[in-house]
Amino acid sequence: MKKLLLVLVIIAAIVGLSLVGQQRGGPAVDEVRVFDVIEQPIESTVLATGTLRYGDERRIRAELDARVEEVRVDEGDPVREGQVLIVLQQDDYETEVNNQRTNVTLRDIDIERAQLQIESLNIQLARQQKLFDQNAAQASTLEDLRNQIAQAEVNLKMQRQLLEQSEFNLAQAQKRLNKTVIRSPMDGMVSALDIKVGELAVATGADIPLMTLVDPTQIYSEVDVDEADIGNVLEGQSVRIFAVAYLDTPLDGVVTDIATSARQVPGKNSLVFPVEVEVQPQDEVVLRPGMSTRAEILNSTDRAFPLVPIEAVQEDAGETGYRVFVFEEGVAQMRSVSLGPQDDRYQAITEGISVGDQVITGPYRVLRRLSDGATVAMESADESTD
């Protein structure tokens, strides 16, 4: 009897708790966050990464083999066009110039000697001609003198050719000597110095410059744009650039050049197009070549669109379209939408919603399983987010 009474009490308690639950409103309703749809122009972006480099970069190399005798600049020094940067040992090249100059002098003497010989033979020929006219000389003598003059003229022509060759050799030797003094081809700054006094400068072989000069007044970021985005990039577009060392400081830039052909990036299957961005002059940060950068290439539009947060847009399962959920009097109403441009925060909607609609944005654990017509409640302002 006591056991039966105990069972009846337990059953009554369960029924009582069930009735209390029904009186308190039944099963719990999901709480959601909503966003009031706004309408304004949107600035879409193409994201890319790259590195900084100076605009005008010259690698200075030796044009002949010689040891370095002087280095007249240090890394970081400003230089002017025509300024002497490096002097190579000149002894061998000076000796070559002196030898070629001596050859030129000797050729001049040989030409003068040949000219004197021709003059002397012509005088002799004139005398013999007078004697011949007086029947005092033989015709064979005249003929012999004429042959000697012809040979002397050939010799003179040869000496002049040899002089021309010697002058050419002298000019080439002088050029080689001049190349032992390496001058700056531009106004700029020494960004790298890779040679020291006593080391051998090599004209051929290893592709290592003696030094690198740059124009520090121009700096560029060369970024790689994915082939899927290159159609949205044009010369003259504005760019926001973020150097890795200064991620909170956006720098202004302009697209100045777009590569005509794509290239393969190691480790990736997609192709990229190198895009050159000129960084505008600024005094906020110190930029150095080689720094990694992130670029946001901006596509501005004057047209205003209804905007929603990107996280509110879902792709229809098994469909090619997109959807959002709109909060209407405690019910989640699904809307199919057409998308326009987007930026880092907002997605433009061209069809499907209007300004003033309240779009459900989260929390994600609720949004991912939300269905059309589901009963929802607006999340309180002091609710925590996930």
Image (spheres, rainbow, N blue to C red):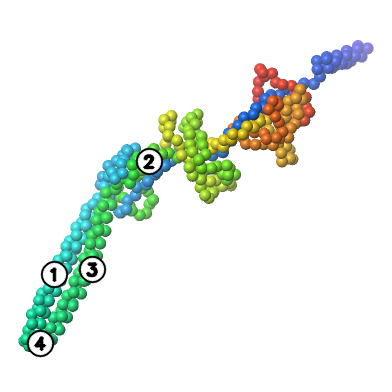
Q: Nearer the viewer, residue 307 or 14?
A: 307
Q: Earlier in the sequence, mark 2 or mark 1?
A: 1
At numbered mark 4, what does the secondary structure look like: helix, strand or loop?
A: loop
Is disc 4 in contact with disc 1, using a CB cutoff of under 8 Å? no
Label 4 to label 1: alpha-carbon separation: 28 Å
| Residue type for callout 1 | Arg
| Residue type for callout 3 | Gln
- Categorize mark 2 by other alpha carbons within 10 Å: few (<14), some (14-19), many (20+): some
How far across and how far down the image is residue 339, in percent?
A: 67, 36
At numbered mark 3, what does the secondary structure look like: helix, strand or loop?
A: helix
- Categorize mark 4 by other alpha carbons within 10 Å: few (<14), some (14-19), many (20+): few
**Which is more foreground, mark 4 or mark 1?**
4
Q: Earlier in the sequence, mark 3 or mark 4?
A: 4
| Residue type for callout 2 | Asp
Labelled disc at residue 215? 2
Labelled disc at residue 113? 1
Where residue 323 sits, quadrant-wise, is top right
Q: Can residue 3 be seen here?
A: no
At numbered mark 2, what does the secondary structure look like: helix, strand or loop?
A: loop
Q: Give the labeled residue for mark 4.
A: 138
How far across and how far down the image is residue 136, in percent?
A: 6, 87
Residue 297, compared with residue 263, is above or below; it is above
Q: Is residue 212 left or right of residue 246?
A: left
How far across and how far down the image is residue 272, in percent?
A: 55, 46
